């Protein structure tokens, strides 16, 4: 087979920046939590929120290789791909393959859920809490803390699986997926139609919307710093005169 003379631009800049952002942030989130630097942990968490929301928006309005409707396929396509039959197995996949597509979705869902739990959780003694902690009851915050710890292990397991899959493609299928995630470009063994990448201003708009959401959350959404009944200051104690 002949290598395509010109490598195809496959991954746009937003997908790559967000991806490597995840790679940097995840260890930072772990380290800041483990070392008790919770202020820093919350800041990293809000950056993670911005990245995840930007990626979700980009999955709706971004480049064809970034869009969910471009890579989330049904069970038949996944089976065909695994069994090496059908169009998905024969033609080179310009983007995520049918199985990889769902692992992307799983990763984004877990990262998003982890951020959401962090927003409402509190630490063991209830002294430090996420910016939306006042919106939930004590019991919910406690349950969120346990789930936050559990989910981190699940994310780690998914990352290990992710890296194992990449190593499998690299060493068994002789297919280097990492370089395209760095440069955006990939060589295909046959000519393929290059995807029409979406303009960067659209990604900037997604990032601004996501950052605005993170800012709103940081302020303690919805009417800023809202206090709910269980978090109202206790009523002033009654005077003896009140009983007369
Ligand atoms: C910190 C942990 C990581 C997370 C949370 C993560 C998450 C993701 C996500 C969400 C995607 C989909 C990209 C998109 O469409 O937006 C992806 C793809 C990818 N990641 Fe990671 N990643 C991690 C670590 C790594 C590392 C360390 C490497 C390289 C050594 C790597 C290499 C890749 C590659 C090559 C792809 C593209 C796979 C394909 O061609 O379908 N990832 N990753």
Image: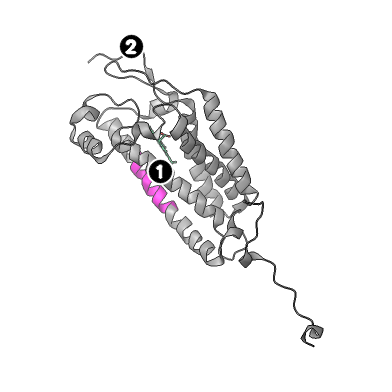
| Helix, strand or loop: magenta stretch | helix
- Queried on whether the Cβ of the residue with tag 1 lies below 8 angstroms from ligand 1, the answer reads yes
Image coordinates of residue 99 in percent, x first then y, are 29, 38
Does the CB distance between marks 1 and 2 fall below 8 Å?
Answer: no
- What residue would you read off at disc 1? 107
Residue 243 shown left or right of residue 97 in the figure? right
How busy is the neighbourhood of tag 1: few (under 14 within 10 Å), some, or many (20 plus)?
some
Residue drawn 37% across the image and 46% down it: 158
Q: Quadrant of the N terminus?
A: top left
Q: Which mark is residue 5?
A: 2
Between 206 and 106, the one lying in front of the other is: 206
Q: Quadrant of residue 104?
A: top left
Disc 1 to disc 2, C-alpha distance: 34 Å
* Figure quadrant, ligand 1: top left
Determine if residue 24 is in view: no
What colouring method underlies this structural image? one colour
Between 55 and 126, the one lying in front of the other is: 55
| Element under disc 1 | helix
Residue drawn 51% across the image and 41% down it: 25
Residue 242 shown left or right of residue 169 in the figure? right
Range covered by the magenta-colored residues = 152-163
Q: Quadrant of residue 197?
A: top left
| Element under disc 2 | loop
Residue 59 shown left or right of residue 125 in the figure? left
Residue 228 shown left or right of residue 237 in the figure? left
Image coordinates of residue 221 in percent, x first then y, are 62, 51
How busy is the neighbourhood of tag 2: few (under 14 within 10 Å), some, or many (20 plus)?
few
């Amino acid at each position: 087979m002949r290598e395509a003379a010109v490598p195809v631009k496959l991954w746009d800049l937003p997908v790559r920046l967000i991806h490597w952002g995840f790679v940097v942030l995840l260890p930072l989130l772990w380290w800041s939590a483990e070392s008790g630097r919770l202020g820093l942990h919350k800041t990293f968490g809000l950056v993670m929120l911005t990245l995840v929301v930007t990626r979700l928006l980009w999955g709706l309005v971004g480049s064809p290789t970034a869009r969910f409707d471009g890579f989330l396929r049904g069970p038949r396509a996944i089976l065909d791909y695994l069994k090496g039959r059908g169009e998905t197995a024969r033609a080179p996949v310009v983007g995520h393959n049918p199985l990889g597509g769902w692992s992307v979705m799983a990763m984004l869902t877990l990262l998003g859920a982890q951020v959401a739990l962090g927003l409402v959780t509190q630490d063991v003694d209830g002294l430090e809490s996420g910016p939306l902690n006042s919106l939930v009851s004590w019991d919910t915050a406690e349950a969120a803390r346990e789930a936050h710890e559990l989910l981190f292990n699940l994310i780690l397991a998914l990352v290990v699986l992710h890296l194992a899959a990449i190593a499998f493609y690299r060493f068994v299928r002789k297919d280097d997926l990492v370089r395209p995630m760095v440069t955006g470009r990939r060589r295909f063994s046959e000519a393929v139609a290059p995807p029409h990448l979406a303009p960067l201003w659209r990604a900037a708009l997604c990032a601004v919307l996501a950052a605005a959401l993170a800012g709103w959350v940081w302020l303690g959404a919805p009417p800023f710093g809202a206090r709910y009944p269980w978090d109202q200051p206790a009523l002033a104690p009654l005077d003896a005169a009140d009983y007369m």
